[in-house]
Amino acid sequence: MPLSSHSRRRSMLACAAAAAAGLALVGALPGSPAGDPRATDATASTAVRATEATVPPATGAALRERPPAVLRDVPYLGGRGPLLDVHRPAGAGGRRAAVIVVHGGAWSAGDKAAIGHVARAVAAAGMVAINVNYTLVAPGRPGYPRQTAELAAAVAWVRANAHRIGVDPDRIGALGSSAGGHLLALLATSRRSRLGALVTWSAPFDLGTQRLRRRLRAKIAGYLGCSPCPRRAAAASPLTHAGAGDPPLLIVNSRRELIPADQARRMAARLRLAGAPRQLLLVPGRLHAPHYSPAVLDTSLEFLARRLR
């Protein structure tokens, strides 16, 4: 007999609470020491280990049978934490590649609904999309390193529930828009997430440079919880950590937009010197993610599908 939506919801909440048994600390992560560039790696690693050590039961009775096309608002850190949506290809069977989709908003605004069209496109391309929210920056609550730790926990949640949501745990990639791209790049360059591929749209890779607009520098200060704090900014910059062990990365940036194209060029150059697979796509004009053309989305999906085979 089918469960009511209320019963399914309670079952999913119970599962998420079990998944977060070792993750209560993430809701109150301390700021990492300003002088320790390894703090982000350590925090994300703690979140991953805590989740993987407590493999949750089925994500509700709704997932014991054939998963629905869309499973919405699933807590991945506990009943009061941020939520994620699971988008599966229509009629999908077996285990598919998964793509973690993360919205932007200068670390302090936005919601997964803003990038829902990307999640739907991922599912239409035959992959499972995991559209993730994270705790936003607020006064007295910086985003670093909390937000990266939360995304690490979301990746671990997907792996822990892979057989229940129809995902191959060895084929997980990600696509992030603006601040979401930065957070995913920071996670990927920590080499803790084991992502198979990553696409970033309009992502800042060097938070310490002064060659940014004043408004963006103010948002970075809010994310870091300090200003100026060059060592902390370096620790929170994917450019600092980029190296040979990073997953294949497609970097997309407009030539004349909010995020200077020089950020994308420098990240691509760093990866090239390290021998890491990378692709740089500079788009004419001023458009900032997620307002790119459908052609950019198509290119991004093709990159992910090819790398996650």
Image: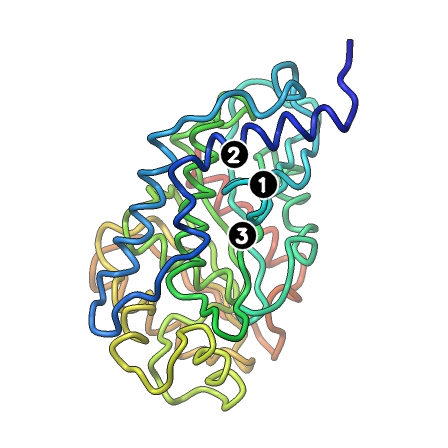
Q: Secondary structure at mark 2?
A: helix
Q: Judging from the image, what secondary structure is the residue with disc 3 in?
A: helix
- What amino acid is found at the position of numbered circle 1 in the picture? Gly
Tell me which numbered mark, 1 or 3, is placed earlier along the sequence: 1
Label 1 sits on residue: 79
Q: Quadrant of the C terminus?
A: top left
Disc 1 from disc 3: Cα separation: 33 Å
Taking 98 as reference, is 45 above or below it? below
The amino acid sitting under disc 2 is Ala
Label 2 or label 3, whichever comes before in sequence order: 2
| Disc 1 to disc 3: CB gap under 8 Å | no
> At x 36% / y 32%, what residue is drawn?
52
The circle on residue 300 is 3
**Numbered tag placed on residue 297 in the rendering:** none
Determine contact: label 2, label 3, CB under 8 Å. no
| Left or right position of 72 against 41 | right
Q: Residue at x 33, y 65 (%)?
A: 238
127 or 86: nearer the viewer: 86
Residue 39 is situated, as x and y percent measured from the top left of the image, at 26, 61
Nearest the eye: 98 or 158: 158
Label 2, label 1: how far apart the Cα atoms are: 6 Å
Residue hosting label 2: 17
Q: What separation in Å lies between label 2 and label 3 (alpha carbons)? A: 34 Å
Q: Nearer the viewer, mark 2 or mark 3?
A: 2
Query: Disc 3 residue type?
Result: Ser
Graded by Cα atoms within 10 Å as few (under 14), some (14 to 19) or many (20 or more), the crowding at tag 2 reads: many
Residue occupying image coordinates x 20% and y 68% = 36
Count of labels in the image: 3
- Position in image of residue 188 (x %, y %): 35, 52
Q: Position of residue 196 (x, y in %)?
A: 38, 41
